């Protein structure tokens, strides 16, 4: 009996070695992207962030990847497996586990063409495991700081507005803030910044509304149509003045159902309700997808 048990364990181990568990996971069923369409997927990965940008050319930019929990990581893998893409880049906006915890798993399972790190790192095991895996697969590493640009032949581009440099050390407020434009639609991804950073960006912009421009890649905050709400809807973000300036039509909040932090905070939701026409929450609606053409955008839920 013991010999049979040992043989069974060895068989399972050999099976896992030659055919890892994740290869058996089916790809998520995702409708094909239309010609000339850019899609942004705000995934429901619990109390964490994961945004997947599909550019019209077939390149992917994954912004954060959830907390690395079993369910969230398998969902992320199945989702990416279900997309048809030619390249995969990953940008980590913040070193906390709810943003970077799932990156190591994506690198291990799928690889990546480039990894963008936040300005500030950490000794946290999730972050260090991510760095070790990137080194193991020889994934090129860079950083997104102000004036970094990711541009596509179709005219879509992403400009980094914050942080200013690699020398910043203010935890949440050194989160990567990304402005994405495609055709007539502008999207702002704000990481975990607080109202203090929002007001700082506003003061700079008030002095010179071209301050965030990088050559031909212009940034106009008042043109933002879709706002990825900062810090999961925390009470310390999305101040009144910020929402007034952006005047976004649509807001997306990424947060976990019944999370222990009380996100999104009631006061933040009240401010958003006053300034934003449409509010979408992953804890209530699941995955949220934005389809953008050069002329317009539409939003759909899971």
Image (spheres, helix red, strand yellow):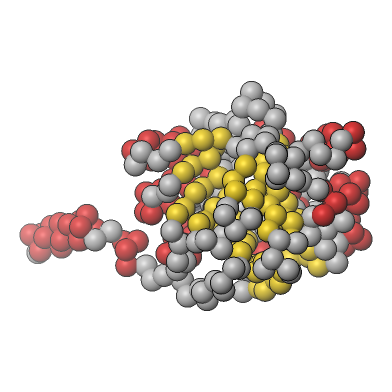
Q: Looking at the picture, does residue 261 appear above or below residue 162?
A: below
- Side of 108 where 103 appears, left or right: right
Q: For the C terminus, give its image quadrant.
A: bottom right
Residue 284 visible (yes or no): no
Q: Judge from the rendering whether residue 298 lies leftward or rightward of residue 11; answer left or right.
A: right
Q: In the rendered view of the protein, which quadrant contains the N terminus?
A: bottom left
Tell me residue 71's x, y (percent): 48, 61
Q: Nearer the viewer, residue 2 or 66?
A: 66
The residue lying at 91 percent from left, 51 percent from top is: 244
Q: Residue at x 37, y 36 (%)?
A: 135
266 left or right, relative to 128: right
The image quarter in which residue 236 lies: top right
Residue 182 in view (yes/no): yes
Q: Position of residue 259 (x, y in %)?
A: 67, 56
Residue 151 x, y percent position in the rendering: 60, 48
- Of 260 and 272, nearer the camera is 272
> Which residue sits at x=85%, y=51%?
222
Q: Is residue 72 above or below residue 202?
A: below
Q: Residue at x 70, y 48 (%)?
A: 179
Name above or below for residue 246 compared with residue 120. Answer: below
Classify 226 as above or below 112.
Answer: below
Q: Exactly how many numbered labels are in the figure?
A: 0
Image quarter for residue 42? bottom right
């Amino acid at each position: 009996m013991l010999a049979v048990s040992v043989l069974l364990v060895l068989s399972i181990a050999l099976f896992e070695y030659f055919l890892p568990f994740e290869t058996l996971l089916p790809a998520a069923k995702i409708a094909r992207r239309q010609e000339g369409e850019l899609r942004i997927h705000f995934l429901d990965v619990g109390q964490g962030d994961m945004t997947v940008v599909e550019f019209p050319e077939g390149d992917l930019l994954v912004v954060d990847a959830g907390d690395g929990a079993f369910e969230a990581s398998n969902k992320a893998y199945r989702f990416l497996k279900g997309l048809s893409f030619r390249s995969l880049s990953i940008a980590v906006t913040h070193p906390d586990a709810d943003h970077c915890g799932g990156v190591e798993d994506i690198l291990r399972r799928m690889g990546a063409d480039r990894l963008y790190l936040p300005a500030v790192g950490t000794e946290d095991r999730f972050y260090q495991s991510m760095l070790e895996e990137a080194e193991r697969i020889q994934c090129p590493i860079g950083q997104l700081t102000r004036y970094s640009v990711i541009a596509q032949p179709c005219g879509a581009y992403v400009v980094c507005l914050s942080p200013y440099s690699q020398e910043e050390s203010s935890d949440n407020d050194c989160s990567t803030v990304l402005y994405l434009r495609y055709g007539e639609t502008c999207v702002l991804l704000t990481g975990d910044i607080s109202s203090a950073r929002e007001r700082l960006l506003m003061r700079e912009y008030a002095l010179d509304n071209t301050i965030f421009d990088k050559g031909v890649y212009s940034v106009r905050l008042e043109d933002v149509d879709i706002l990825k709400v900062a810090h999961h809807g925390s009470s310390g973000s999305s101040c009144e003045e910020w929402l007034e300036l952006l005047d976004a039509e649509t807001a997306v909040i990424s947060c976990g159902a019944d999370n222990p932090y009380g996100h999104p905070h009631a006061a933040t939701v009240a401010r958003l309700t006053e300034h934003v026409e449409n509010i979408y929450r992953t804890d209530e609606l699941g995955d949220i997808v934005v389809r953008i053409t050069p002329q317009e955008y539409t939003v759909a839920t899971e």
